[in-house]
Amino acid sequence: MPCELSIVIPAFNESSGLPHALDTIKAIAANASDSYEIIVVDDGSTDDMPGLINAAHARTPEIRGIILSRQFGKEAALYAGLKHASGKAVVTLDADLQHPPELIPDMLEQWRNGAEIVHGVKQDRGADSLIQRLTAAIYNGVFSRLSGFDLRGSSDFKLLDRRVVDVLTKKLPESGRFYRGLSAWVGYQQVTVPFDVAPRETGERHWGGLGLIRYALHTVTAFSSLPLMIVPALGLVMLVIAVILGVEAIFSRLAGNSISGFATLEITILFAASMIMIGLGIIGQYMARMFDEIKGRPVCLISRSIGMNNSPGNDF
Ligand code: UDP
Ligand code: MG
């Protein structure tokens, strides 16, 4: 039986905070809707998340679980949860209570008034350091310039109408998923709800510097092919420099001076080589994305489920 509200929670090694988070979310969901389900997607945790989800399900049958076969990352976990949620409205929420579940009733209200996507937008970035704020600002600036979608303050805390969930899980087959970008891309009636990022109570954040750089490269190349234009632009810069140097060489010759020195030659070669490398690097990024998509591998694999009605197989 499909329910009205599904809450999808991707979770990796969150056992320290999960019982408390589930209690809080459950109380709010039960108040906000007559029929709800909470789906925790265990993203290959190494702590005993399946045990915890089992125990929670035994107490509250509305709490269900999808256990992925290994850690596939938050994007994949979100996708698995959306794919198997049955609700007419689906909320996606972090397991660490950094996305305030108290906002769920407001989001539902907006949905009942006709909104098809309710985006939770970060107002205050909580305990983020100056560097984190700065890199987020640069990333968001570059992304919106290149893709045309303004994702400033955007988060994975969202409510989606069934229609949007179906589009995201059935009509967009790409394996390099970017939830925030895709849910802006689909259109429909979108509204925003501001929220302040609460501090993480237990456990730790799962992002390292390198992971963030990879994430930034993946998402930008998934949403814009404009960086490819940098390649011919670099070529144009090289051409202009070559013409200037060529003209200078001819004039020097006519004026009776010898063609200017070895240093110029060396700098020009190094400059040209670095432009070529940058160009190849940009093309390489797109080839890597094409390689990933062409392989057509599933976004993630499910090892088992807990309490799901339609026992999810590996139907990705
Ligand atoms: N998460 C996940 N897989 C991962 C990394 C994170 O399912 O590989 C989950 C994590 O358990 C949490 C949410 O994604 O529920 C947000 O992760 P985190 O708090 O580490 O990131 P931040 O809040 O800094 O964005
Ligand atoms: Mg967090």
Image (cartoon, rainbow, N blue to C red):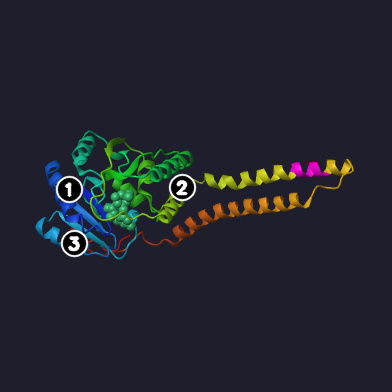
| Labels 3, 1: front one | 1
Q: Where does the image place residue 164, in percent across and percent down from the top left?
A: 30, 44
Mark 3 belongs to which amino acid? Ile
Q: CA distance from mark 3 to mark 1?
A: 18 Å
**Where 45 falls versus 202 (above or below)?**
below
Which residues are drawn in magenta? 243-249
Horizontal side of residue 19 vs 203, given as left or right: left
Question: Which quadrant of the rendered structure holds the C terminus?
Answer: bottom left
Q: Which numbered disc flags the more N-terminal residue, 2 or 3? A: 2
Residue 236: quadrant of the picture: top right
Q: Residue at x 48, y 41 (%)?
A: 146
* Local SS, label 1: helix
- Residue 244 included in the magenta stretch of the image: yes
* Local SS, label 3: strand
Please tell me whether the stretch drawn in magenta is mainly helix, strand or loop.
Answer: helix
Mark 1 belongs to which amino acid? Ile
Q: Nearer the viewer, residue 145 or 100?
A: 100
Residue 66: quadrant of the picture: bottom left
Q: Where does the image place residue 159, in percent across and percent down from the top left?
A: 26, 43
Residue at the spot of label 2: 220
Residue at the spot of label 1: 25
Mark 2 lies within 8 Å of ligand 1 (Cβ measured): no
Residue 12: quadrant of the picture: bottom left
Q: Where does the image place residue 218, in percent across and percent down from the top left?
A: 44, 52
Q: Where does the image place residue 83, in percent across and percent down from the top left?
A: 28, 54
Asked if labels 2 and 1 touch by Cβ distance under 8 angstroms, the answer is no
Residue sitting farthest toward the right: 256
Mark 2 residue crowding within 10 angstroms, few (<14) / some (14–19) / many (20+): many
